[in-house]
């Protein structure tokens, strides 16, 4: 196997080899194939789904944990989401192998494809932790005023979203203020709370609020 992997393999052949290793329960072989870098992470999604259907949880566990050691794990999760592999998605969450960043990356292609309902879009916006996700979802034009306030509050002072800590994020604060969609009273409250918490965001809030802010 080691000698074979020294040569470039045809994509279809490499996928077949990986599928055989995972579905056959040959964990060491699958881990080695992933480590040599010739196999794309997205090629294992349906194989993981099949392994779950067979009850090969040890195989799934070790493959997923191996994937997390290397770059592009987010790509695998995003492809699983796009493929609609619900069993794998649920298992990933149950094993706490999914980070907020992975969830956001998986959601982005669905937004571009216009395959997300307005309630789901607003829910995702409220949970967004990255500037990229906040910008993309906001620019959809479907974010409601009540939802706009949530990531602003969290980014300004830190918070708790879905049981996970939300660290202060000056870039999200700056973006939302630049869009003039945060009510003045929210800016004032965020500034006061930030001062009380000795947060580093107050200066940014003060500078940004020097220009008129209009509620959405």
Image (cartoon, rainbow, N blue to C red):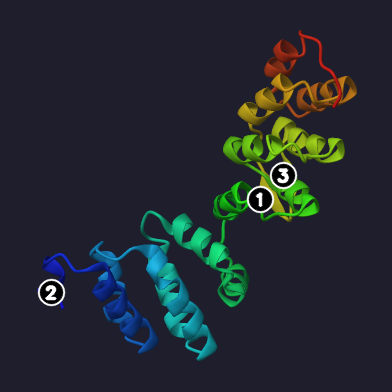
Upstream in the sequence, badge 3 or badge 2?
2
**Of the residues under marks 3 and 1, which one precedes in the sequence?**
1
Q: Which image quadrant for residue 116?
A: bottom right
| Front label number (2 vs 1) | 1
Q: CA distance from mark 3 to mark 1?
A: 15 Å
Task: Quickly name the residue at label 2.
Answer: 4
Residue at (23, 65) in percent of width and height: 36
> Where's the N terminus, which quadrant?
bottom left
Quarter assignment of residue 44: bottom left
Q: Seen from this angle, which residue lies furthest right? A: 185
- Judging depth in this view, the residue of 116 and 3 nearest the camera is 116
- 39 in relation to 91, above or below: above
Residue 53 shows up from this direction: yes
Label 1 belongs to which residue?
Answer: 114
Q: Which residue is mark 3?
A: 125
Q: Does dot 3 land on a helix, a strand or a loop? A: helix
- Residue, x 49% and y 62% (percent of image)? 79
Q: CA distance from mark 3 to mark 2?
A: 46 Å
Q: Earlier in the sequence, mark 2 or mark 1?
A: 2
Q: Is residue 192 left or right of residue 168?
A: right
Residue 75 on image: x %, y % = 45, 56
- For residue 200, say whether it is visible: no
Task: Please tell me whether residue 170 is drawn above or below residue 209 in the rendered image.
Answer: below
Q: CA distance from mark 2 to mark 1?
A: 43 Å
Q: Position of residue 214 (x, y in %)?
A: 84, 18
- C-beta proximity under 8 Å, tags 2 and 1: no
> Element at badge 1?
loop
Tag 3: Cα neighbours inside 10 Å, few (<14), some, or many (≥20)?
many
At label 2, counting other C-alpha atoms closer than 10 Å, the crowd grade (few under 14, some 14-19, many 20 or more) is: few
């Amino acid at each position: 196997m080691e000698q074979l992997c020294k040569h470039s393999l045809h994509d279809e052949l490499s996928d077949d080899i990986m599928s055989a290793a995972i579905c056959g329960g040959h964990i060491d072989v699958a881990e080695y194939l992933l480590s040599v870098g010739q196999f794309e992470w997205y090629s294992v999604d349906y194989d993981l789904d099949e392994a779950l259907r067979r009850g090969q949880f040890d195989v799934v566990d070790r493959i997923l944990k191996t994937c997390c050691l290397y770059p592009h794990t987010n790509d695998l999760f995003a492809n699983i989401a796009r493929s609609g592999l619900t069993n794998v998605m649920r298992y990933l969450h149950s094993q706490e192998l999914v980070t907020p960043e992975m969830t956001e990356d998986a959601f982005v292609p669905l937004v571009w494809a216009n395959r997300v309902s307005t309630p789901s879009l607003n829910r995702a916006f409220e949970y967004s932790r990255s500037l990229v996700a906040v910008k993309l979802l906001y620019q959809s034009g479907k974010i409601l005023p009540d939802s706009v306030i949530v990531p602003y509050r969290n980014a300004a002072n830190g918070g708790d979203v879905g049981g996970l800590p939300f660290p202060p994020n000056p870039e999200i604060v700056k973006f939302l203020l630049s869009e003039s969609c945060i009510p003045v009273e929210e800016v004032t409250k965020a500034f006061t709370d930030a001062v009380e918490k000795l947060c580093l965001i107050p200066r940014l809030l003060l500078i940004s609020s020097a220009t008129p802010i209009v509620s959405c």
